[in-house]
Amino acid sequence: MKITGLETILVRPRWCFLKVYTDEGITGYGEPILEGKARTVAQAVKELEHHLIGQDPMRIQHHWQSMYRHSFYRGGPILMSAISGIEQALWDITGKYLGVPVYQLLGGACREKIRLYAHCGGTAPRECAESAKALVEKGFTALKMGLGVAPLEIVDRPSIVDRVVERIGAVRDAVGRDVDLAVDFHGQTSPAMALKIAKAIEEFDLMFIEEPCLPENVDALAALARSISIPIATGERLFTKWGFREVLEKGAASILQPDLCHAGGIFECRMIAAMAETYYAGIAPHNPLGPISLAACIQLDACIPNFLIQEFVTLGEGYLKEPFTMRDGCIDLPREAGLGIELDEEAIAEKIGHDWKSPMLFREDGSVADW
């Protein structure tokens, strides 16, 4: 079996799908995407074609090493997002060729279902509470919400902290203590401001806070972790096993969130999970992306012992011939070969093309703020 071609497709709202073709008629799916840089990543995929055309798609690690190491300048979001999508597609092909799910090739299933968390909407406390209750009624047992106060100053006013406390408190009161609740800081807070907010919301017994400060300075994150009782989650902006090493070594996070579309693909994230296991850290893959990304995440979630919970934004309705189904806040373990999905070509044809751009936030004085 040989690879004959690669095709990228920009799909609304902000995704990029990849098809890798073979001379056996087997097509593999991947999702090489970086939010706001879809065309750049698609071009990076094009520039990696020479590593793959005419090659055996089942030599996945060999191709990964070639694309990564022969680029000379290693890592980074563009290259790794391109490699990640290609790697997912090669696993899909291999699983389909052998007639087994990808997780079966990675040691087999550790569980029978994959727990999901939903994103809680709303701006005002009452809106957040109503959104949370509606999600719980749909069967979710875990929710995540944002701070709802961006943009933030390096050290902001006490009223800002009060607003955060009020919103989170409203949701906790609405759903009770049988529902897990996480809060995404989105890297918008300085370490000093993150500490102020985290101390103020400790009373709500959160599952985790996500990216309370940016990942470039691991020591700052580690200092915060030692100062609060809430578990810290991070990793969506880290790439490859090397990017996660220092976080684990310094105890900067107890929950890692590698993105299978950015960090290097399925097997690279399997190795990151194994590293995390030696530090007793959990894995909650980052996934605000499309249905191919979710399918890849589920394959990883199935086979790692330290899986915690899975982020998602779509079950594939309008994109997959058979979307994933949720029951009691979980997806049953898929049994189909490869990634276990088939794209609905007719539905996708109506969603071709997008020009999604990252939001831009500015503080009151006009200076740039993190979004």
Image: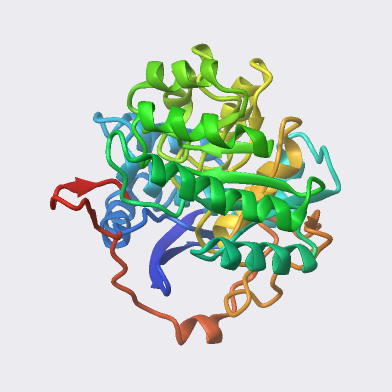
Residue 56 visible at all: no
Give me the residue at 75% from left, 43% from top. 302
Give me the residue at 57% from left, 75% from top. 319
Image height check: is 206 above or below 328? above
Left-right relation of 210 to 339:
left
Image height check: is 227 above or below 152? above
Left-right relation of 108 to 129:
right
Measured as percent of width and height from the top left, residue 109 is found at 81, 41
Q: What's the colour scheme?
A: rainbow
Measured as percent of width and height from the top left, residue 315 is found at 65, 67
Image height check: is 88 above or below 307? below
Give me the residue at 50% from left, 59% from top. 289
Taking depth in this image into account, of 175 and 284 the one nearest to the observer is 175
Taking depth in this image into account, of 250 and 5 the one nearest to the observer is 250
Residue 85 visible at all: yes
Examine the image and state in which quarter residue 190 appears.
Answer: top left
Left-right relation of 153 to 256:
left
The residue furthest top is 249
Measured as percent of width and height from the top left, residue 40 is found at 26, 56
Examine the image and state in which quarter residue 106 appears.
Answer: top right
Measured as percent of width and height from the top left, residue 110 is found at 82, 37
Give me the residue at 71% from left, 74% from top. 322
The residue furthest left is 366
Taking depth in this image into account, of 35 and 48 the one nearest to the observer is 35
Examine the image and state in which quarter residue 28 appears.
Answer: bottom right
Left-right relation of 76 to 331:
left
Image height check: is 233 above or below 219? below
